[in-house]
Amino acid sequence: MSTMIAPARETVRAADRVAAARRRVTMGETVAQTLTMAWRALKKMRRNPEQFFDVALQPILFTAMFAFVFGGAIAGDVQSYLPLMIPGILAQTVLTTCMATGTQLREDMEKGVFDRFKALPIARIAPLAGPMVADLLRYTIAAALTFGMGLVMGYRPGGGVAGVLAAILLAIVTGWSLAWVFTWVGTIARSAQAVQGISMMILFPLTFLSNAFVPVETLPGWLAAFVRINPVSHLVTAARDLANGPVVSAEVAWTLLACLIVIAIFAPLSVRSYKRHI
Amino acid sequence: MSNAELGRAGGAGLAVRVEGLVKTFGEHRAVDGIDLDVRPGEIFGVLGPNGAGKTTTLRMLATLLRIDAGRAEIFGVDVAANPHVVRQLVGVTGQYASVDENLTARENLWLFSRLQGVAAPRARRVAVELLGQFGLEEAADRPITQFSGGMRRRLDLAASLITRPPLIFLDEPTTGLDPRTRGQMWDTIRGLVADGCTVLLTTQYLDEADQLADRIAVIDHGRKVAEGTPDELKTAVGDSTLQLLLAEPGEVPAAVAVVRRALGSDPVLSPEQGRLNVALDQADLAADVLIALRTAGVSISSVSVAKPSLDEVFLALTGHETGHETGDRPGDETGDDGRTRMEETR
C-alpha cells in the first residue's frame, strides 16, 4: 500500500453534478436495480447453503409423513391420498418458503449494508424485491422436490408433464405474491424472531384452514366458509386440476386474482414501512 | 423546476447549509437546533463526545433519518424535499462498515456500481481502480469477514467514491483504528479534497479535527457550542497544558502566585491535592514557569506537558466536562487505543 492518495484526475464539480442529477428513478432503473439485488441474494445463498435446508427437507419429510399419517384415515389408503395431498403439500412448502423471505429480510436490514442501500439513489423497492426474485429459485426447488417425492411414493399425476409444470409454475407465482405479506411483516417487526412468530400465526391458519389436506365437505359450515375464500384453497384446487387433469379451471384465475390483490396491498405497505424504518 | 433552479434555490454556493436542525427521539432532543455552513472544497469537522448528536446530524443530512424541524440543503438542494437528488450528490461512510459481509471486496464494489447504473465493463474497471487506490488488491477476492477493521473502513470509503460524489460524509472515520492506519486514512481524506470534493466528518478526537479540518464545529447535547478554525478553538485553552504535581500540597497558593506572575494567567487547580494545570500559549513557556517556581523555592514532584485534550476544550467552552452516558447509537463506544478520549477524565 504505497499510496492512498487519489491519483490526479479531473476535478469533481458540484454544480455540474446538481445539474446532471436525476429527479426520480425510472421503471427501467428499478428493474435493473432489483435484478442487481437478486444477484446479491443469490451470491448470499450460494455462500450459506444451509438456507436450502428448509426447502430441501420439508417437502421430503412432509410428503412421507402426511401420506402415512393421514392417508388411511382420509382417503382409505396412501395411494389414493397422494393426488389429493401432493398439491396440498406443494402449497404448504411454497408458503413456508416465503415465510423465510420475511425473516431473512429482517436479519439483513439490521446489517450495516442496508444503511448504504438507503443512502444510495436507488428505488426503495429494490432491496425488498431483489431477494424475492432470488427466492424464485427456492420455490422451484421446493416445488420440484414435492412432486419428485410424490412420484417416488407412487403418485402418477394424470395431467402429465405439462400439467405438473403448470401446477409448479402457479405455485411459484402464488408463493412469490404471498411473500409480500411476509416481507411487510419483516419491515414492521422488531426482530427476526418476532417475524418468525408472526409469520407462523399467518401461515398455519392459511395452510391448515384450507382444502390442502382434507376435503372441505368434512368441515363444519363456518370453517368451510373460510376455507372456500382462503387463497391457498384456490391454489390447491387449481394445482390439483392441473396436475391430475390436466384441466385449467376457473380456480387458476381466482388464484391469480388473489395474488394480484395481495401484491397491490402489501408491496406498497412494505415500501412505506421500509422507508419509515430509516 | 429544473435542476439548475433546484441547485440555485438557496445556499449561496455552500456545500452544506443547515439551519435550526432538530431531531427528537421520544423526549430526548438528540439534535437541538444546529446551524452549519460548509463551504465547497473544505474539510469540515464536527467535534463532540459520544451522544452529542454528531451521527444523528449526519444521518439526517444523508437522508437516513427524517428531519423533525429546521432546514438542510446540500449544494442548494433541499434534503427533505429532494432526497433522491441529494443521494446522488453525497457519499456516506458510516461508523460501522456498511458493506456486505457475504460478498468479497470486489463483489461489493461491483454491487454498488451496478446499483448506481454504472455499465458492467466500467463497473469492473472502477472496482479494480478503487481496490488499487485503497491497497486492497490482494484482498480483493477474500470474504469481508476476514478483513481487519482498517481494511473494512477502506473498502467502505472506496464504496462511497464509486460515482465520485462532490460531498462526502465520514462518520468517525478513524475510531478504533491503529495509529498507522489512521494516518493513511487522513492522507486519503486529504486526497479527496485535492480532487475537488468537500468532506464533512465527525470525530471525537481533537487531534484528528486539528490535523484534518479547515473549520470545526464543536457540538454538545445536540447544540453547537463553538465554531472556528482549529487554531481559534485551541487558543481558548492554550496550545498545550503544563501539568504540575507539587511536592508539598500546602505550597499551592504560592505556586498559583508564581504562575500568575510568570504568565499573567491563573492555573486550573485539579481536584487532586497539589496538582495544577497551566494552560500555555506556546509549549516553550513551560520552561519559564519551571524556572520561576525554582526561583521561588516551590518544589515539584512531577511535571509533564500535554496537548490540550478535547476535554479541556470542552471545559473551556462549556464549563462542564464531556462525560456523557448516552451514545449516538447503541454500541457507540468502539475500541479504545489509548488516545485522548473523554471517558478518561470521567
Image (cartoon, grey):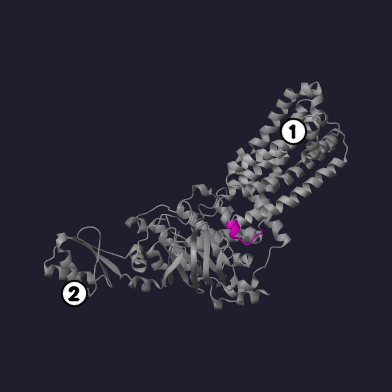
Residue located farthest toward the bottom when viewing the structure as drawn: B12
Q: Is residue B2 visible?
A: yes
Could you tell me which secondary element the residue under label 1 belongs to?
A: helix
Q: CA distance from mark 1 to mark 2?
A: 92 Å
Q: Is residue A5 visible?
A: no
Q: Is residue B237 above or below residue B141?
A: below
Q: Amino acid at mark 1?
A: Ile
What's the magenta region?
Answer: A116-123
CB atoms at circles 1 and 2 under 8 Å apart?
A: no
Taking the image as shown, residue B125 lies to the left or right of residue B283, namely right
On the image, the x and y values in percent for residue A135 come to: 69, 44
- Tell me the residue that label 1 is attached to: A89
Q: Residues within 10 Å of mark 1 (few under 14, many from 20)?
A: many
Residue B123: in magenta span: no
Q: Amino acid at mark 2?
A: Arg
Q: Which mark is residue B261?
A: 2
Q: Is residue A123 above or below residue A38?
A: below
Q: For the N terminus of chain B, which image quadrant?
A: bottom right
Picture residue at 36% right of the left edge, 68% below the top: B317
